[in-house]
Image: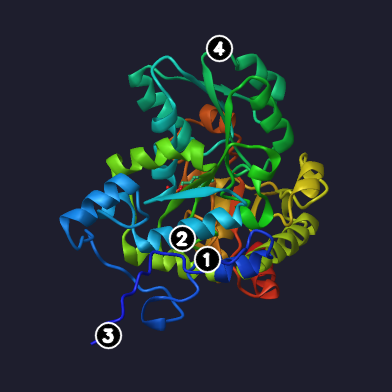
Amino acid sequence: MQTQKVEPTIDDKPIPLRVAGPSTQCVHAGEARQKMADAITDAICCSSTYTFQSTKSVIDFIEQKQPREEYGRYGSPNEKVVERKLAALDNGEDAIVFASGMAAAVGLYMAKLNAGDEIVFFDQCYHRSREFCSKHLARFGVVTRQVPTGDFSAMEAAINSKTKMLVSESPTNPHLTVIDLEQFAALGKEHNVETMIDATLASPYNIRPLDYGVDYVWHSCTKYLGGHNDLLAGSIVGSKEKLESVRNLRGIMGGINSAHNLYLLERGLKTFALRMERHNQNGQAIADFLAKHPRIEHVYYPGLSSHPTHDVAKRTMRGFGGLITFLIKDADWRKTADVVDACRISRIGPSLGGVESLIEQPLVMSYFNYPPEQRAQFGIPDNMIRMACGIEDTQDLIDDLAQALDS
Ligand SMILES: *Cc1c(COP(=O)(O)O)cnc(C)c1O
């Protein structure tokens, strides 16, 4: 029996990693130097509750706010490691991890918005997030406004004395519009309104919105951060002060992760930067290939000079990610589906950011029951395909797409 006292939750010697490169941060940030049983990896700490040695130690914990665990819904050792790592990757002071990306967004909105408050969205944002505000927070008196993506004058015009938050995704899905974050953050500051960016498609490897003055970064960790299509999780990164109310609310709502899920996320994060290099490489190479292909009508990819927001992307992003949207020339929805069905490597499915490439036709996958006018309004033509490049060999993915387009 080991009798030595082990405290896996306490950072014995935190590594000063804010200045380290992204791969070093991925591997080491947020972890204690010496861990339980002298293991190199973090133990999966399965415990719903945490015990105290005596009544005195309970009182000490309450009065001195000692950094230890109390009850699973308020935090756990595995969660602390993941949160510190995520905060380091986004150059943020604090991160809060939730059971899914949506749980994270809901947690932020619920903590920050009151009856009578207003929130303004750029219209290409993740639609479930806007839906939560327009359908559900509306029942509690919150007003949701929506303006065209990238139209800062329209966003400014939508701001009034009740506006509490500006929200955008960047790059957006599936059109990959990149937002000028400096302008976005400045607009918020000018009107004393907080700003939030869904940076899931960029990931902290390609852009760090907090560096531009944005208040909150939202990630679906289900995508690039987890990276293996084997978990759901979400996070909000920002200042400790701003996130305190979000953390308190999460403790009440309970949208937290199991120790096993957090360990999977921590393990995924170790190779995050390495995987992003390949996602970026595959995304650019496949976009270049498709842009020259005779069967392709149009390619949306921020790394192509033809993309309307290529300049701001080039100025602010390290790479342009693995998501590519393209239109098949002279194809109805069935002919477009034939291309999707002919792929032998990419699997058909929603989601993105995992090691396995995924391909889908937005009309079928996300908008099948929408009337044509509404699909047109969302910019989803019948001949659109969205490919989420995994980390397979670049040439294999290109060869596979070539044979699918030729078939
Ligand atoms: C997947 C996704 C979300 C939602 O995250 P979940 O983990 O599925 O809840 C939000 N925004 C973007 C851009 C996404 O791709």
Q: Tell which tag, 3 or 4, sits nearer the viewer.
A: 3
Alpha carbon distance from label 1 to label 3: 30 Å
Q: At 38% across and 43% down in the image, what residue appears?
A: 103
Residue 287, x across and y down, in percent: 73, 57
Residue of label 4: 161
Left or right position of 326 against 336: right
Q: Tell which tag, 1 or 3, sits nearer the viewer.
A: 3
Q: Nearer the viewer, residue 400 or 169?
A: 169
Residue of label 1: 269
Q: Is residue 38 above or below residue 244?
A: below
Instruction: Determine whether label 1 and label 2 are within 8 Å by CB.
Output: yes
Q: Secondary structure at mark 2?
A: helix
> In the image, what residue type sits under mark 3?
Gln
Residue of label 3: 2
Q: Nearer the viewer, residue 400 or 197?
A: 197
Q: What is the residue that sits farthest to the left in this orientation?
A: 55
> In the image, what residue type sits under mark 2?
Val
Residue 9, x across and y down, in percent: 38, 64
Q: Is residue 249 above or below residue 319?
A: above
Q: Earlier in the sequence, mark 3 or mark 4?
A: 3
Residue 74, x across and y down, in percent: 31, 49
Residue 321, x across and y down, in percent: 66, 56
Q: Is residue 255 visible?
A: no
Alpha carbon distance from label 1 to label 4: 41 Å
Q: Tell which tag, 3 or 2, sits nearer the viewer.
A: 3
Instruction: Determine whether label 1 and label 3 are within 8 Å by CB.
Output: no
Residue of label 2: 82
Q: At 54% across and 18% down in the image, what residue appears?
A: 163
